[in-house]
Image (cartoon, grey):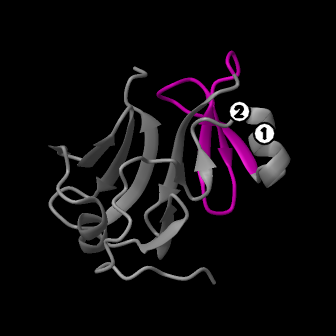
């Protein structure tokens, strides 16, 4: 079990978002598969029309035309998630302590920006229940 960082430990300021559950947006499909092995499933993402690769603790959206990772997704039912290699509890209070105030609050969640990368914490409307967390390039539409 990886060491869990206390939500009160703000020594890591998260000036950049580099990895979500160990996956970087800068990796290419072949690098990801060489490192993580074959996914348990590959499904089409209905919004992007790209393939979504399902691994044990992460889903990765990859468009075949570029081989570039479009997004990294962690399901909200997991007890923990990892940002830049630091394991955090899957709780909104811990996320607020680690990342500070969100840049945007939408009906379906909160968005945090660092450079060109963004993290969106999807939440059940009207509650603090986390449905999932995405890492994506904020400059790609």
Q: Position of residue 8 (x, y in %)?
A: 28, 80
| Res 130 quadrant in image | bottom left
The answer to whether residue 38 shows anywhere in this view is: no
- State which quadrant residue 139 falls in: top left
SS under mark 1: helix
Residue 140 placement: quadrant? top left
In this view, 113 is above or below 63: below
Which residue of the protein is positioned furthest toward the top in this rendering?
A: 65
Residue, disc 2: 28
Residue 12, placed above or below residue 32: below
Spot occupied by residue 96 in the image (x, y as percentages of width and height): 23, 65
Tell me, for residue 114, which label it has, or none: none
Range shown magenta: 41-66
* Membership of 47 in magenta stretch: yes
Whether residues under marks 1 and 2 lie with C-beta atoms below 8 angstroms apart, the answer is: yes
- In this rendering, would 117 be left or right of 69? left
Lateral position of residue 102 relative to residue 119, left or right: left
Query: Would you call the spot at circle 1 few (<14 residues within 10 Å), some (14-19), or many (20 or more)?
Result: few
Q: Secondary structure at mark 2?
A: loop
Q: CA distance from mark 1 to mark 2?
A: 5 Å
Q: Is residue 54 visible?
A: yes
**Location of mark 1 (residue):** 31
Q: Quadrant of the N terminus?
A: bottom right
In the displayed structure, 38 sits above or below 94; it is above
Compared to residue 48, the image places residue 108 above or below, namely below
Measuring 74% from the left and 34% from the top, which residue is drawn there? 29
Residue in the picture at 33% in, 60% down: 13
Q: How many marks?
A: 2
């Amino acid at each position: 079990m990886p060491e869990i960082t206390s939500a009160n430990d703000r020594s890591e300021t998260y000036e950049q978002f580099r990895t979500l559950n160990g996956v970087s947006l800068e990796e290419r499909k072949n690098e990801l598969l060489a490192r993580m092995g074959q996914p348990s499933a590959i499904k089409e993402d209905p919004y992007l029309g790209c393939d979504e690769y399902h691994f044990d603790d992460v889903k990765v959206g990859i468009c075949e035309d570029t081989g570039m990772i479009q997004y990294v997704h962690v399901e909200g039912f997991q007890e923990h998630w990892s940002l830049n290699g630091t394991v955090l509890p899957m709780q909104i209070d811990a996320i607020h302590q680690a990342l500070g105030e969100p840049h945007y609050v939408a009906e379906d969640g909160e968005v945090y920006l660092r450079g060109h990368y963004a993290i969106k914490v999807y939440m059940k409307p009207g509650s603090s229940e986390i449905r999932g967390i995405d890492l994506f390039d904020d400059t790609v539409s």
